Image: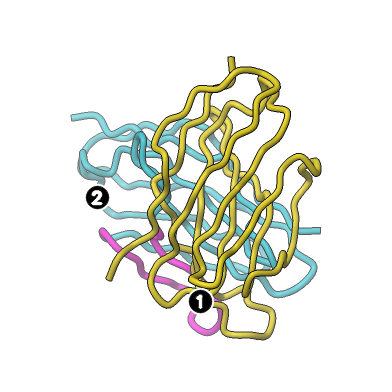
Chain colours: A yellow, B cyan
Amino acid sequence: ETGVTQSPTHLIKTRGQQVTLRCSSQSGHNTVSWYQQALGQGPQFIFQYYREEENGRGNFPPRFSGLQFPNYSSELNVNALELDDSALYLCASSLTSGGRGGADTQYFGPGTRLTVL
Amino acid sequence: AQSVTQLGSHVSVSEGALVLLRCNYSSSVPPYLFWYVQYPNQGLQLLLKYTTGATLVKGINGFEAEFKKSETSFHLTKPSAHMSDAAEYFCAINFNKFYFGSGTKLNVKP
């Protein structure tokens, strides 16, 4: 069973640029969530996709956008990068079984470290 | 509103000593609670979770946590610390989305 993978591992961009981060879900999972983890802080929820549709969003501006593909892989796109976007971006996949979904365990990838100069 | 508070950003114990990492939550509905561990430069790994049923939950690597509704707590414990337990630990509550605490870094002294 393949776990959650993310690419690239590290990325350096300059302010104002755009970036795309990629995530491959664990086999059989239908839900993917993205988190931003700034240095010294806990992960902050960006958004979640369930069966290719956005299924919840945290307190992030519209320049953070995403996609989920039919094979349940996902992309996180960030436009007009700002210095404060420097962080570890984590992707997590889960198998949502319906209902409130809160009991579903999320399995995390190793993350992409984004540095904005 | 849902939130998680972890008391103590850094905890230091000696090898073989009891590990106690504190987590308090706020939730308007019965919570689903999780503990994750993060090793340097890695993603988060699930230690244990509470959904329903037995309030004492056992996880991997000898960790366990007890859900106490009256105290709105979900503290993580391990009877005897090992050097390999040094990592950062995150408590989280899940209500449609995960809310993580700010984390506790555990240092284990030889």
Q: Is residue A5 above or below residue B85?
A: below
Q: How far apart are labels 2 and 1 at the CA level? A: 34 Å
Quarter occupied by the C terminus of chain B: top left
Query: Splitting the image into 4 quarters, where does residue A2 fall?
Result: bottom left
In front: mark 2 or mark 1?
1
Q: Which residues are magenta?
A: B46-61
Q: Is residue A19 above or below residue A57?
A: above
At x 69%, y 67%, the residue is B95
The circle drawn on residue B80 is 2
Please state if B2 lies on the left or on the right of A28 as rendered: right
Query: Splitting the image into 4 quarters, where does residue B41 fall?
Result: top left
At x 59%, y 26%, the residue is A86
Are tags 2 and 1 found on a single chain? Answer: no
Kindly identify which residue carries mark 1: A95
Chain hosting mark 2: B
Quarter occupied by the N terminus of chain B: bottom right
**Tag 2's secondary structure?**
loop
Q: Residue B82 at what x, y percent from top left?
A: 21, 44
